[in-house]
Image (cartoon, rainbow, N blue to C red):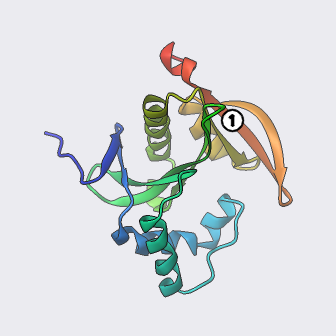
Amino acid sequence: MTTTVHGEVARGALVVLREKRLADARDDFRWRSDAELARYDAARPFAATYHDYLALYRDELAYPSPYRHSLAVEDLHGRHIGNVMYYNIDTARREAEIGITIGEREYWSRGYGTDAVQTLVRRIIEVTRFRRVYLKTLDWNGRAQRSFAKAGFQVCGRSRRGGNSFVVMECLASWLDDGG
């Protein structure tokens, strides 16, 4: 019997996507402060204190942006293992960009990221009726590119930002309707 998780938004084979909670702040701070995880995101690690982070986190929960939505990723046992988000929401073009962090390393390369991305994409397309979901991943991150390909994404271009090179990948709603 499957138990519904408080704040559950969508469920995959390995993960549950749910609304963020204040209790997630400690994990999020740890992941955002981690130099290796920041490198995978082409970002700098968060360098301020947990107290400072918590203030920003509370504001984000209290005043969510209409152009960005972040969800927690849990395994099926209720452990918070990462986050997914969609942002750069463009209702006129009917598309959004997504991102993912699996912060708990023991969940890497085990299908959790792929399942979280597939679950998020299906949810976005079902709820918004967007026609396209896209992402950018560092050109040297082959593991992420393979995971995104397994989730139904195809390479559609390249971009540069801040001295980094990215592979742009997309998933079209029509691909989901016709099985790929």
Above or below — where is 149 with respect to 174?
Answer: below
User: Residue 10: x and y, percent?
Assistant: 35, 41
Is 134 placed above or below 108 here? Answer: above
Picture residue at 28% right of the left edge, 56% below the top:
78
For the residue labelled by badge 1, is the local secondary structure a helix, a strand or a loop?
A: strand
Q: Depth check: 171 or 132 in front?
A: 132
Q: Amino acid at mark 1?
A: Met
93 left or right, relative to 100: right
Q: Position of residue 52 (x, y in %)?
A: 53, 84
Taking the image as shown, residue 175 lies to the left or right of residue 157, namely: left
Q: Is residue 45 left or right of residue 80?
A: right
Give the percent coordinates (x, y) of residue 9. 34, 44
Residue that carries the numbered disc 1 in the rendered image: 169
Q: Which quadrant does the N terminus fall into?
A: top left
Picture coordinates of residue 167, whole percent (x, y): 75, 41
Callout count: 1
Name the residue: 56% across, 18% down. Answer: 174
**Extreme residue toward the left, this view:** 1
Q: Residues within 10 Å of mark 1 (few under 14, many from 20)?
A: many
Q: Quadrant of the C terminus?
A: top right
To which quarter of the image does residue 123 belong? top left
Above or below, 112 relative to 65: above
Question: Which residue does the image show at 36% across and 70% down from the upper left?
Answer: 22
